[in-house]
Image: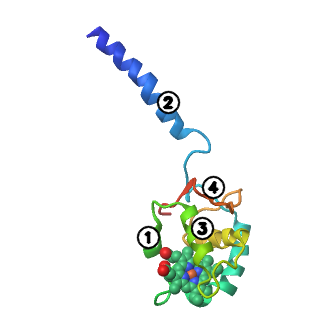
Amino acid sequence: MRFDAVWVSVLVMGVFLPVLSAQTAPHSVLTTRDGVYTAEQAQQGKAIYQSQCGMCHGDALEGQGENSPLAGSEFLNRWTDQTVADLFMKTIVMMPAMDPGTVPPKEVAQVLAYILSASKFPTGSKELPSDPQSLEAIHIVKP
Ligand code: HEC
C-alpha cells in the first residue's frame, strides 16, 4: 500500500506536473480572446478593408452570395479551432479574389485585426504579427 502511494506521487511529480507547467508557460497557446491586436492596427485595417475587400465581403463583413462572411457565427464556426496562421495564409494566397497575393503581409495582418475587431475580440497592447510562425500560436475561439 505504502509503496503504491509513493509510486503515485513519483508519477504525479515526474509526469503530470511537467506537462501541466508546459501548458501554462509563457509563449504557449494564445487565443483570439487574449488581446492579440491593437485598436490602431484594426483602424488601419478598416481602411484597407473598405478599399480592397468590402465590395465583395460587404460593408459590415456580412458576405454576399459566394463571398464568405468575415464576421458572425457562420464565419466563427468555420474558423474555430484553427489558428490565425490558417486564416492569414488563406487570405494572403487567395485574396483579393480578382488579384490574389497583392496585399503585403503587414497589411494582411492589419485587415485581420479589423476582422477580429468586427467579431468583438478584445484589443491588446501588442500588434498582431504578420508572419505565419508567430500566428500559428494564436488559436481562433469564439469571442
Ligand atoms: C472579388 C471579390 C473578393 C474580394 C475583393 C475579396 N474577396 Fe475574400 N473571398 C471572396 C470569395 C468568393 C471567397 C470564397 C472563396 C472560397 O472560400 O473558396 C472569399 C473568401 C475569403 C476568406 C475566407 C473566408 C472563409 O471563411 O473561408 C477570407 C478570410 C477573405 N476572403 C478575406 C478577404 C480580404 C481580407 C480581402 C481584401 C484584402 C478580400 N477577401 C477581398 C471574394 C473576394
Closer to the eye: label 2 or 4:
4
Q: Earlier in the sequence, mark 2 or mark 1?
A: 2
| Quadrant containing ligand 1 | bottom right
Q: Residue 35 carries which label?
A: none
As displayed, is residue 79 above or below residue 64? above
Q: Name the residue under label 2.
A: 18
Amino acid at circle 2: Pro
Tell me which numbered mark, 3 or 4, is placed earlier along the sequence.
Answer: 3
Disc 1 residue: CB within 8 Å of ligand 1: yes
Q: 124 or 79: nearer the eye?
A: 79
The span from disc 3 to disc 1 (Cα, nearest Å) is 14 Å
Residue to which mark 4 is pinned: 133
State the separation of the CA atoms marked 2 and 1: 33 Å
Q: Name the residue under label 1.
A: 78
Q: What element carries label 1?
A: helix
Front residue of 93/96: it is 93
The residue that disc 3 covers is: 88
Please tell me how crowded label 1 is: few (under 14), some (14-19), or many (20+) other residues with Cα within 10 Å.
few
- The quadrant in which residue 54 appears is bottom right
Q: In which quarter of the image is residue 28?
A: top right
Looking at the picture, how far across and down is residue 12, in whole percent?
Answer: 40, 24
Q: What residue type is labelled 1?
A: Arg
Q: Which residue is drawn at 43% across and 30% down?
A: 16
- The picture places residue 138, in percent across and down from the top left corner, at 57, 56
